[in-house]
Image (cartoon, grey):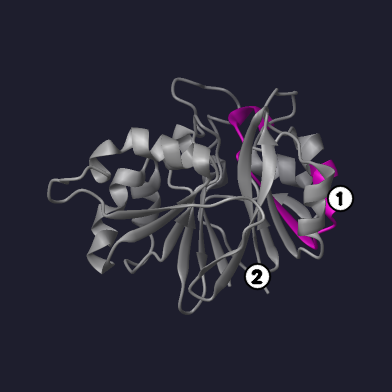
Amino acid sequence: MRLTFLGTGTSCGVPTIGCQCYTCSSEDPHDKRLRCSALIETETTRVLIDCGPDFRQQIMSQPFRKIDGILITHAHYDHMGGMDDIRPYCQFGEINVYADPIARQGLLQMLPYCFAEHRYPGVPAIQLHEIHKHEPLHIGDLDIFPIEVMHHDLPILGYRIGALAYITDMKTIDEGELDYLRDVDTLVVNALRQRPHHSHQTLDEAVAFARKVGARQTWLIHSCHDIGRHEEVNASLSSDIQMAYDGQIIEIG
């Protein structure tokens, strides 16, 4: 199984519009972070995690072939604002989109023309599936297990896919959910910045969480410009916990 980080930035991306800070002025391509999204692929199956407003730009660098499913983590624009851009992939058939009840309702409100009784030609053909925490789903040869984390007071979904766990926008997690992360080899989790935030983990909180899970390798995502430059942050961390970067590919299992 292969994971491609399509985007590792937060809702504003990096560089942030109008900002000339130390991070935003960096010429290192590792400091250019589009909104969070990832592509999971095996020989026969291709699944997208989140489809934010940078999706078109992100997917242009990837081979054009069928997307078997889209997993939505939660109903915020930076995680599903690019859904209209999936329309070229509908030539392979309807796109299966999986979302919890809150995110499902958000999609219905954001894209009402996709779910109208009489749809005009050319709109994305979406088959919307409501999913729930702890209810396994299967897409191609991928077994996927949704877990629940808290984005401040909003329950959202993380995903366990074999030896991989992908979690974004988490602030806290119930102790009971940790059982579902046992024996994870590769952990992907959010680390917004150094300073505290009411709805996102800080870098220190993300490191502490990674240590609690005990994954062999942890990759940090959903980072804003305040976290600092990629090379310098990674130099301050141990080799088993590192910031991911846009376009990075890792093999899992």
Contact check, label 2 and label 1, Cβ < 8 Å: no
Image quarter hosting the C terminus: bottom right
- Disc tally is 2
Question: What label does residue 253 carry, if any?
Answer: none
Magenta span: 207-227
> What crowding class fits label 1: few (fewer than 14 Cα within 10 Å), some (14-19), or many (20 or more)?
some
Mark 1 lies on a secondary structure that is helix
Give me the residue at 65% from left, 70% from top: 252
Mark 2 lies on a secondary structure that is loop
Q: Is residue 195 left or right of residue 211?
A: left
Give the mark nearer the N terminus: 2 vs 1: 1
Give me the residue at 36% from left, 43% from top: 82
| Residue furthest out toward the bottom | 43
Q: Compared with residue 140, is residue 209 higher up or lower down, i.e. above or below?
A: above
Q: Is residue 181 left or right of residue 156?
A: right
Q: Which residue corresponds to mark 2? A: 252
> Residue 164, position in %: x, y?
67, 63
> What crowding class fits label 2: few (fewer than 14 Cα within 10 Å), some (14-19), or many (20 or more)?
few
Q: Is residue 39 left or right of residue 123?
A: right
Could you say which quadrant of the image residue 104 lies in? Answer: top left
- Distance between the Cα atoms at labels 2 and 1? 19 Å
> Residue 37, position in %: x, y?
50, 49
Pick whichever, 204 or 145, lies toward us: 145
> Residue 167, position in %: x, y?
65, 48
Q: Compared with residue 133, is residue 190 higher up or lower down, i.e. above or below?
A: above
Question: What label does residue 211 carry, if any?
Answer: 1
Indicate the amino acid at tag 1.
Answer: Arg
Image quarter hosting the N terminus: bottom right
> Residue 67, position in %: x, y?
38, 64
